[in-house]
Image (tube, grey):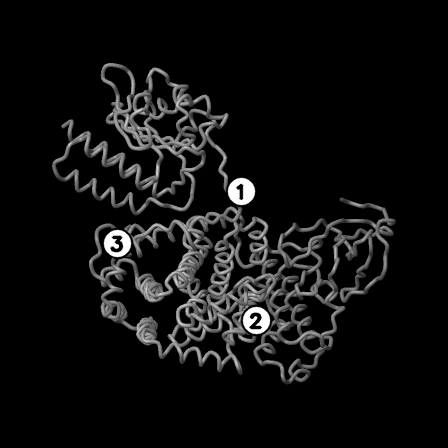
Amino acid sequence: MNRVDNTADYQLEHSLSCADGSSLLLARAGEHDYLLLPAAAQPAAGKLPHSLLAQPVDHTTLAGQDYACYLRDGQKLLSEIPPGMLNDKEVTGIACDIMEALLQLQLNQLALPIVDSEHILIDAQQQIQLLGQHAAISHDTVQQQQNLIQAGRLLYWLYSGRRYSSLPLASLRPQLDNELLQLCQQLLTAHTASPLPTRAILAQLQDWLVRQQSFIRPQGNHCAALEQLLQRMRHSPDFPALSQAVSAINHIGNADSERLQVLAEIILKDFSLTNKLLKVVNSANFSQFGGTVSTVSRAIVILGFDTIRNLALTLLLFEHMHNRSHAQEVRDVAIKALFCGLLARNLARHSGLREAEEALICGMFQQLGELLCVYYFRDEYRLIHKKISSGSTADQAVLHTLGLSYAALGAGTVSLWSFPESMISSLEPYPAGPVRQPQSSTARLRMLGNLAQELTGLLSTANPPSQAAARQLLTRYERASALDMKQLDTVIEQTQAAFDDYLREWSGEQPRHGQAYQLKTARLDTQAQQPTTQIVADDALTTSYLLAPPATASLLSAGIQDITLTLLGSYQLNDLLRMILEIMFRAVGFDHVVLCTKDPRQNQLQARFGFGPDIPELLKHFRIDLDQQDNAFCIAMERNVDIFIEDASDTTIASHIPGWYRQLNLAQTFIIFPLVLEKRKIGFLYGDKKQAHSLPLRPDELNLLKTLRNQALLAIRQKQN
C-alpha cells in the first residue's frame, strides 16, 4: 500500500533528533507502531532481502516531506536500551549482527546513510535490524567506510556506556577483554571498506563469542559428573581398546610424511575393521574407480587419507556400539548418529563447502553423548526416558540424571580421544534464535553439525514433521545456510539413499521397521512430495525418474556382476533373459516384470515370460500392435527411448495408453526399456507398480537398469552371431 498526503492514518507520537541532523518520527496507525524515516531525494538503490536489514512497509508524505514507514511492533530502538543492561557477550552478539549486515551491504556494493543506535531496532530476544535501506547508497566506498567507523563508535558506546569521544575505550573499560578493545579500535580507524577486513573482524567477533558461550564445557559439579562418567567407561572392558584405536588415528598429523602407512597399519591391527572397511570400499558407494580393492593401502591412495580415516572412525564407533545385549536401544541411537553424519556431509557438499568429510564426523558425534549413555549407562538411560514420559523436557531429564548434558558428555569424550578443537567446538549447541553466518572453518563445522542434528530430530519422530516445522528450521538457519525447501528435500533424499546403501553394505539388511526405516522414508511434508506428471505430448514421453530412497542399487549391481559372469561362459538365451527379469523383479520391487518380443509372423510385440501375480493370464493379453503409433509402447520402440509413466490415469497421458492396457486395469506406474539392435525392433523389458507415483528410482538406479537392458542386447547379439 502507499499512503500519500493522508496524515489521518499516522498519529505522530514523538520526534527524535538523530546524529546526522535528521528527525525520526515515532507514529501509530491503527493498532501498529511505526518509525518514519525521511525518504531519499533519489530513488532507493534497490532492495536487499536480509533478516538483519529492515524493509519499509509503506511510504507517506507528511507536511511536504516524504517518509519511509517501518513497522516496529514489539521492537525498541537500540538507543532506548541503557548500555548497562547489556553484558559484554550480549553486546558482542549485537556487534556480530551489525558486522554481518554491513558485510552483506558491501558484497552488494551498497551503504546505509547512517549506522547508529537510533537506526537499529532490537526485540526482546536481542535480535536486531538496521534501518535505512530505503535510502541505501550504491557504489559508495567512502560511505561504506563511514558505516564501519559508525559501527565502531556504536560499539564504543555499548561497551563503555558513554558516547564516542577522544577518550580511549581502554581507559573507560580497563577490564574489557583486550581482543574486543582491538577489534573496536580497528573499526574506529577503518581506512577502507572491503569485504575481506569486514569478514575478518566478523570472524574474530564470532570466535570470541563462541569461546565465552561454551555451554558444553563442564564447570564445577558438571566437571565432577563428567569425570565420574568417564571413569566408569574406562573400567568397561571394551572402552579402553576403542579409545586407543580412535586416539591413534587422531594422532596422525598432516605433517607426517608416512601418515598413509601409519593409518594403514592402525587399521590392519583390527582384523574385523579391515574386512569391514574393504567391504564398504568395494561397495556401490565407492566403486567409481573401477576394479576390486583388496588392500587398505590402495584404498587410501585411491580415495584419499581423509575419506579412509573418517570411514575407519565411523566404522569403529558404529560397529563397537552395535553389539550389546540391549542391541535395539543402542542400534536406534547408532542409526541416528550415522544418518546425522551423512546428512551433515551432504549439507556441506550441497552448499559447496570444503569441510564435507569433517562434517561427517561432526554430524555423527552430535549423537555421541546419547550413544555413550545408552551403551554404558543403561539404567540411567531408561530413567531419563521415564522422566521424559512424566513430563520433563529431554534436556532437563538428561541434566538431572547424569549431572550434565549429552553434548557435554560427548565433548568430554571427544577431547579424551584427541580430536581437534574444531571437532569439539562443533558439538556446541546453538542457543535459541537465528544462527549467524559462519565466517571460519570451525564455525561452519558447528553450523553443519547443529543443522544436521536438528533436521535428524525432525525426521526421526514417528509423526511426519510438518512443512511449517521445516520452514521454521530454515528460517532459523537462513543466514547461515542458503537452503530453500526444495533444496532441503533433495539433500534429505540423497542422504536417505546413501544411508540405505550403508546399512545394507555394513549389515547386509534392508530395514523395514524401527528407527532405520523411519529415517529412510521420512518426508518433511508428504503432500508437497507428490510429483506432478510432466508427460503431456509425444515428445515428452522420454526417460523420467522420481528421486526417493533407494532399495535397489546394491542388488542391481550384484545382479549385473552375475550376468557379466554368465555372458563369459556358455548359456541359454532364455535362461539369461529370465535372470535379468528376476533381478529387476527382486531388486526394484516391481509388481510385474515382462519380456515382450516381436512376433515374426505379425507386426506385433507379444509377452513371452515374466514374474508377478497372475502372470500366466497377463501374458495371454499383453500384446502390442506396432501399426498403432500413438501409444507409449510404440513410441518407445519407434524412437528407441526409455519411457517412465508415473500416472497412467493422468488426463495428459491417457491418450497414449492403449485400450487393452486400460481394460486389464494392470498398473498406474510402469517403465519400458526397448530392445533395439541396429534399428531392428526385437522387443522390450517392462516393469510396473499398481499405484501411481509408487516407483521411486534414483538416477544411478535407472542407469543400472539400463545396464541390464544393454546386457540383454549383448546376449541377443552374441547368440545371433
CB-based contact (under 8 Å), mark 2 and mark 1: no
Which residue has dot 2 on it?
205
CA separation in Å, label 3 and label 1: 36 Å
Give whichever of discs 3 and 2 has the lower sequence position.
2
For label 2, count other residues whose C-alpha is less than 10 Å away and answer few (under 14), some (14-19) or many (20+).
many
Is 98 left or right of 1, judged from the image as shown?
Answer: left
CA separation, marks 2 and 1?
Answer: 40 Å
Identity, as a three-letter code, of the amino acid under mark 1 = Ala
Residue 156 placement (x, y as % from top left): 67, 75
Q: State the image coordinates of residue 531 (x, y, percent, origin top left).
A: 49, 37
Measured as percent of width and height from the top left, residue 201 is found at 56, 69
Query: Can residue 419 be seen at all in this image of the molecule?
Result: yes
> Which quarter of the picture shows residue 546?
top left
Residue for badge 3: 282
Per the image, the residue denoted by label 1 is: 528
Depicted 557 relative to depicted 404: above or below: above
Q: Amino acid at mark 2?
A: Leu
Q: Mark 1, residues whose alpha carbon is within 10 Å: few (<14), some, or many (≥20)?
A: few
